[in-house]
Image: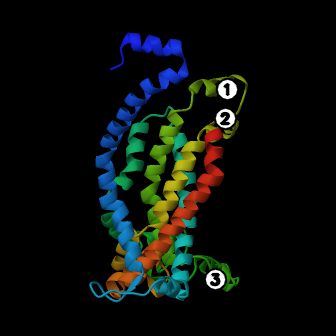
């Protein structure tokens, strides 16, 4: 404990005399800080760091569980040379591009409407958020029935508009090719787009996740100073001008957060794809593998083919892709969102 006389003497003698007095309590505080973070560090190490290290170690092995043999980077080379891997990566990209932008756009629009002073907006907020808290597997099974080609509600809705019935979750043909056939023009193979089966899964994903985006956008809208809106209206700004020049720039940090989280979740999507495949197509990966994302491909390699090393290599490659994409977002979009 530093006495008052010691402090006065150190102040009168200058900075060199004050340094020893400040060093001891600071080091003691550092030790207490380490003790406080120790439980969290142990939990993260046991449930995150060690499993990741073990997965990397398995990815360098071949054979079945308990009969591993070190093979180095063979699993990675085999994965990168496999057409199935690149097909699964393409499907994953289709799924991400077909869900993240649409979900964010709809979530922002609905959140902006629910942020206005409308009657019953609390009920509307609960309704939109409810799909996100419902069991993913249970709701996916219900949506698989909705897309049933014989008795599903999706084909019934198409019939109301005079459109032909579709096979939905058992249709491997690309969505743009189907549209081209309906309009009587040909679509080249590279422009066929995702399969109709994958589009059905995308529709479910948007329906389920949009509630999360709405809640986060509502929180971001609540942090915007209402005086800015009042000043803009006094100056004669229209609704679109207020939204364009005030809401969007000030929502940049919130939008960036949702973008990062949504991309990570979409690249790891598994539960609803698995459930809808099993319920409708009765085969994992969908018709002709048209809904086989990287997570599904990894699952098949592990549980159907018993290739633990190969599956771990796919998991490591997927993790590196997510890490690299997240780094790029923080590098090029993070500072812009903070300075907005």
Q: In terms of sequence position, does the residue under pointer 2 or pointer 3 come before the other?
A: 3
In the image, is residue 166 above or below residue 6? below
Q: Look at discs 1 and 3 and give the one toward the viewer.
A: 1
Q: Are marks 2 and 3 in contact (CB under 8 Å)?
A: no
Q: Nearer the viewer, mark 2 or mark 3?
A: 2
Q: Position of residue 104 (x, y in %)?
A: 55, 53
Callout 1: few (<14), some (14-19), or many (20+) C-alpha neighbours within 10 Å?
Answer: some
Residue 26 image point, x, y percent = 41, 31
Q: Which of the two discs, 1 and 3, labels the residue nearer the N terminus?
A: 3
Q: Which residue is mark 2?
A: 242
Q: Nearer the viewer, residue 98 or 81?
A: 81
Q: Which mark is residue 233?
A: 1
For the N terminus, give its image quadrant.
Answer: top left
Q: Residue furthest left?
A: 66
Residue 233, percent from left and from top:
67, 26
Question: CB under 8 Å between callouts 1 and 2?
Answer: yes
Pointer 1 or 2: first along the chain: 1
The quadrant in which residue 66 appears is bottom left
Left or right of 339, for residue 284: left
Q: Count residues near mark 3 (Cα–Cα under 10 Å), then give few for <14, some for 14-19, many for 20+.
A: few
Q: Dot 2, how many residues are within 10 Å of its Cα: few (below 14), some (14-19), or many (20+)?
A: some
What residue is rendered at 51% in x and 79% in y? 88
Q: Which sits in the foreground, 241 or 50?
A: 50
- In the shown orientation, is residue 153 left or right of residue 191? left
Which element is circle 2 on? helix
Q: Residue beneath label 3, please? A: 181
Q: Residue at x 61, y 37 (%)?
A: 250
């Amino acid at each position: 404990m530093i006495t008052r006389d010691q402090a006065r003497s150190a102040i009168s003698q200058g900075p060199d005399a004050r340094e020893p007095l400040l060093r001891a309590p600071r080091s003691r505080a550092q030790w207490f800080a380490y003790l406080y973070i120790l439980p969290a560090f142990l939990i993260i190490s046991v449930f995150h760091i060690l499993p990741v290290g073990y997965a990397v170690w398995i990815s360098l092995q071949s054979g079945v569980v308990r009969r591993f043999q070190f093979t180095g980077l063979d699993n990675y080379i085999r994965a990168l040379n496999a057409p199935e891997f690149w097909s699964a990566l393409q499907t994953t990209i289709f799924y991400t591009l077909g869900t993240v932008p649409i979900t964010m756009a709809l979530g922002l629009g609905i959140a902006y409407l629910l942020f206005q002073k409308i009657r019953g907006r609390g009920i509307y907020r609960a309704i939109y958020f409810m799909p996100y808290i419902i069991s993913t597997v249970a709701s996916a099974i219900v949506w698989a029935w909705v897309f049933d080609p014989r008795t599903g509600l999706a084909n019934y809705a198409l019939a109301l508009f005079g459109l032909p019935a579709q096979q939905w979750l058992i249709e491997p043909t690309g969505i743009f090719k189907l549209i081209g056939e309906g309009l009587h023009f040909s679509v080249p193979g590279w422009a066929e787009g995702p399969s109709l089966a994958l589009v059905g899964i995308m529709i479910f994903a948007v329906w389920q996740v949009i509630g999360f985006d709405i809640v986060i956008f509502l929180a971001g809208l609540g942090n915007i100073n209402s005086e800015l809106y009042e000043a803009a209206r006094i100056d004669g700004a229209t609704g679109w001008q207020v939204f364009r020049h005030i809401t969007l720039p000030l929502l940049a940090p919130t939008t960036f957060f949702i973008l990062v989280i949504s991309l990570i979740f979409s690249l790891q999507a598994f539960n609803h794809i698995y459930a809808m495949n099993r319920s409708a197509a009765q085969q994992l990966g969908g018709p002709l593998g048209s809904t086989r994302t990287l997570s599904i491909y990894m699952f098949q390699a592990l549980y159907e083919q018993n290739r633990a090393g190969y599956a771990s290599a796919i998991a490591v490659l997927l993790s590196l892709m997510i890490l690299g994409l997240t780094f790029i977002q923080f590098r090029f979009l993070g500072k812009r969102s903070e300075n907005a």
